Image (tube, grey):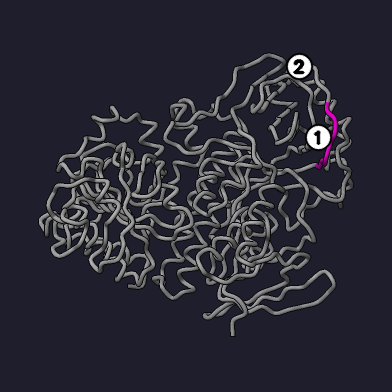
């Protein structure tokens, strides 16, 4: 007997994301946390654009945007002199910018979203031990009042942080080391006149050229509020504590230190007096702590039916606000795969792709943040242009081209291919909504989505036939949406490059992650010599226009049906933005996963040949 599908340990942003996504995709779960209440600490504050895209897909981005403040950049100072500034600029086709939100607010927003599904956090409840077999996991949990319970679940997910009990119980290695420096962290109000939305990084170099003093300030919601971090003074250093008090929990020196004196406002003010770019006074301190940093990566993200995510799998310097955001993406990647497996609809090897996709990401983040902690983000300036650096920091260049559960891309393909992030676009109009929609509006709160691009009325008929076949094949577990070219009724279509001008390298990287070449064949082996795109004989697309190659595109999108006569959601790509973002000029199909990555691309659409190609790629994920 199973008590729940998935037991999640840890109710920080990562665990909450895992729980919310499991529930959104129809899986049952319980989430426990050893703390009696949410901690009122800012801790992780940077929200990357990719995380906002994920929250958009989850259906909770509006609440996050209401609570956050924009991050515009960082002002740089060294030895009392201004060194310039970093402006956080992204290409205009990226839907969200950088933001700052205290971790306690992030947790509140996700927890309230989770409550929509009727799931609550079981607080003051700790995982003590667990065992697993081929059918599930038996966990022993204990509440603060000593009550014990055994929980039988199909899977266990450890989102319990750097000192993870789940990781330790599995016996996984956590290779890396601790940095010798110690830092203090505080949430304070500062009365300087620096431009809003900009952080501050100020350093002082000693006689030997090394940094001997540091101040980093990140803006928070509220007038003049910042999260400030700096090196600790000697009286607060762990090195000055008795030898027996210098150990770290579970042997990992990372995170807020407990059981020692917290910094006072006088400690914060002393550093501001030395390093602030202008005279200023700190006040209204809400909390403070001493913390330490390590860089470590687990040897594997899963063992049998037990998985780990977030800080339980990777820890590193907070440079660039990568950690929490990477963990949220871990959780999003894992949750839909667990949910599909719980429903019995997944291929047995689908869960293996979690480690295959996410561990390389964690490895790259650890390496990059260690480098940036020592040399600054400018360390990458020689290898990459500034826009590429910003896209990488925004986590928009993460891709899974070598994943075992995505299709193989065609060499020289233009545009997003299997494993790439599915870019957003605007200008999509339907038969009812008066104002244009974004693609992400259409993807919001959906699972797998089949995007079908039709460049003619005849192609729309072919799309209808493909949509019907894939719906039957996946037992209704995939939503089909059709995007119709603005001149579909004329039989001609615009050239994406000619219409928008040659795409900049930055735009291509932001939306696709692939190099330039010819977009003529398929990524997935569809036979271009199979049936033509008009292979929809008998399909009712729109009154009087099916298969004719002519008609009003507005009518085509308003009354499209599939081969079974069911309504087929269709939208007019009124400004050609979808065609440009996805670099397609003809009929094409794209499969978008629940985490916003493409798992397949078929172009051109060729009737039965396209269905066969899509079936082959979907069989990597679904039990067909």
Which label's residue is closer to the chain start, 2 or 1? 1
Q: Is residue 245 left or right of residue 196?
A: right
Q: Is residue 574 left or right of residue 396?
A: left
Occupied quadrant, residue 488: top left
Between 421 and 570, the residue placed more toward the observer is: 570
What percent of the width, then of the height, locates residue 523? 25, 52
Q: Which mark, by number, is residue 232?
A: 1
Label 2 – label 1 distance at C-alpha: 21 Å
Between 570 and 231, the residue placed more toward the observer is: 570
What percent of the width, then of the height, locates residue 584? 25, 43
Describe the element under mark 2 as helix, strand or loop. Answer: loop
Q: Quadrant of the C terminus?
A: bottom left
Residue at 40% from the left image edge and 60% from the top image edge? 448
Residue at 58% from the left image edge and 42% from the top image edge? 322
Location of mark 2 (residue): 278
Between 617 and 192, the residue placed more toward the observer is: 192
Between 382 and 192, the residue placed more toward the observer is: 192
Residue at 38% from the left image edge and 54% from the top image edge? 592
Check whether the beta carbons of the residues at disc 2 and disc 1 lie within 8 A of each other. Answer: no
Describe the element under mark 1 as helix, strand or loop. Answer: loop
Q: Which residues are magenta?
A: 282-289
Residue at 85% from the left image edge and 72% from the top image edge? 145
Magenta span includes 287: yes
Q: Quadrant of the N terminus?
A: bottom right
Q: Residues within 10 Å of mark 1 (few under 14, many from 20)?
A: many
């Amino acid at each position: 007997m199973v008590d729940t599908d998935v037991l999640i340990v840890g109710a920080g942003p990562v665990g909450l994301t895992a729980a919310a996504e499991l529930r959104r995709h129809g899986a049952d779960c319980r989430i426990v946390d050893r703390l009696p209440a949410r901690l009122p600490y800012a801790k992780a504050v940077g929200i990357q654009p990719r995380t906002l895209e994920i929250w958009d897909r989850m259906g909770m981005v509006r609440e996050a945007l209401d609570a956050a403040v924009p991050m515009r950049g960082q002002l740089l100072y060294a030895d009392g002199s201004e060194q310039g500034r970093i402006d956080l600029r992204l290409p205009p086709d990226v839907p969200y910018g950088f933001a700052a939100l205290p971790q306690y607010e992030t947790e509140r927003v996700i927890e309230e979203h989770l409550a929509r599904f009727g799931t609550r956090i079981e607080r003051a409840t700790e995982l003590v031990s667990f065992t697993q077999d081929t059918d599930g996991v038996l966990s022993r949990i204990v509440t603060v009042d000593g009550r014990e319970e055994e929980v039988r679940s199909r899977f266990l997910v450890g989102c319990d942080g750097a000192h993870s009990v789940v990781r330790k119980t599995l016996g996984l290695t956590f290779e890396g080391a601790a940095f010798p420096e110690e830092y203090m962290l505080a949430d304070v109000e500062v009365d300087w006149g620096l431009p809003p939305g900009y952080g501050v990084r100020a350093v002082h170099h000693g006689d030997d050229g090394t940094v001997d003093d540091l101040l980093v300030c990140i803006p928070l919601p509220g007038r003049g509020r910042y999260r400030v971090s700096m090196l600790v003074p000697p009286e607060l250093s762990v090195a000055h504590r008795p030898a027996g008090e210098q150990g770290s929990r579970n042997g990992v020196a990372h995170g807020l230190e407990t059981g020692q004196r917290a910094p006072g406002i006088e400690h914060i003010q002393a550093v501001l007096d030395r390093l602030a770019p202008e005279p200023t006074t700190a006040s209204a301190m809400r909390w403070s702590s001493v913390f330490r940093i390590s860089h470590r990566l687990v040897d594997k993200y899963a063992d049998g039916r037990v998985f780990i995510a977030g800080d339980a799998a990777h820890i590193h310097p907070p440079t660039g606000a990568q950690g929490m955001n990477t963990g949220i993406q871990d959780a999003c990647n894992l949750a839909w795969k667990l949910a599909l497996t719980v429903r019995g609809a997944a291929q047995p090897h689908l869960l293996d792709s979690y480690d295959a996709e996410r561990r390389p990401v964690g490895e790259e983040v650890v390496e990059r943040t260690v480098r940036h902690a020592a040399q600054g983000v400018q360390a990458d300036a020689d290898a990459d242009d500034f826009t590429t650096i910003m896209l990488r920091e925004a986590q928009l260049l993460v891709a899974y081209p070598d994943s075992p559960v995505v299709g193989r891309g065609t060499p020289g393909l233009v545009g997003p291919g299997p494993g790439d992030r599915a870019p957003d676009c605007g200008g999509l109009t339907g038969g009812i909504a008066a104002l244009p929609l974004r693609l992400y509006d259409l993807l919001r709160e959906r699972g797998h989505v089949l995007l079908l691009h039709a460049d003619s009325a005849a192609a729309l008929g072919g799309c209808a036939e493909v949509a019907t076949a894939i719906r039957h094949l996946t037992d209704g577990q995939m939503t089909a949406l059709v995007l119709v070219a603005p001149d579909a009724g004329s039989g001609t279509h615009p050239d994406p490059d000619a219409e928008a001008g040659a795409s900049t390298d930055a735009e291509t990287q932001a939306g696709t992650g692939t190099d330039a070449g010819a977009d003529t064949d398929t990524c997935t082996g569809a036979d271009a010599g199979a049936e033509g795109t008009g292979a929809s004989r008998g399909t009712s697309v729109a009154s009087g226009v099916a298969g004719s190659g002519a008609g009003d595109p507005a009518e085509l999108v308003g009354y499209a049906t599939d081969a079974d006569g069911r309504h087929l959601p269709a939208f007019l790509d009124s400004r050609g933005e979808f065609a440009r973002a996805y670099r397609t000029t003809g009929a094409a199909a794209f499969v978008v996963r629940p985490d916003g990555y493409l798992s397949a691309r078929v172009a051109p659409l060729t009737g039965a040949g396209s269905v066969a190609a899509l079936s082959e790629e979907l069989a990597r994920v679904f039990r067909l």
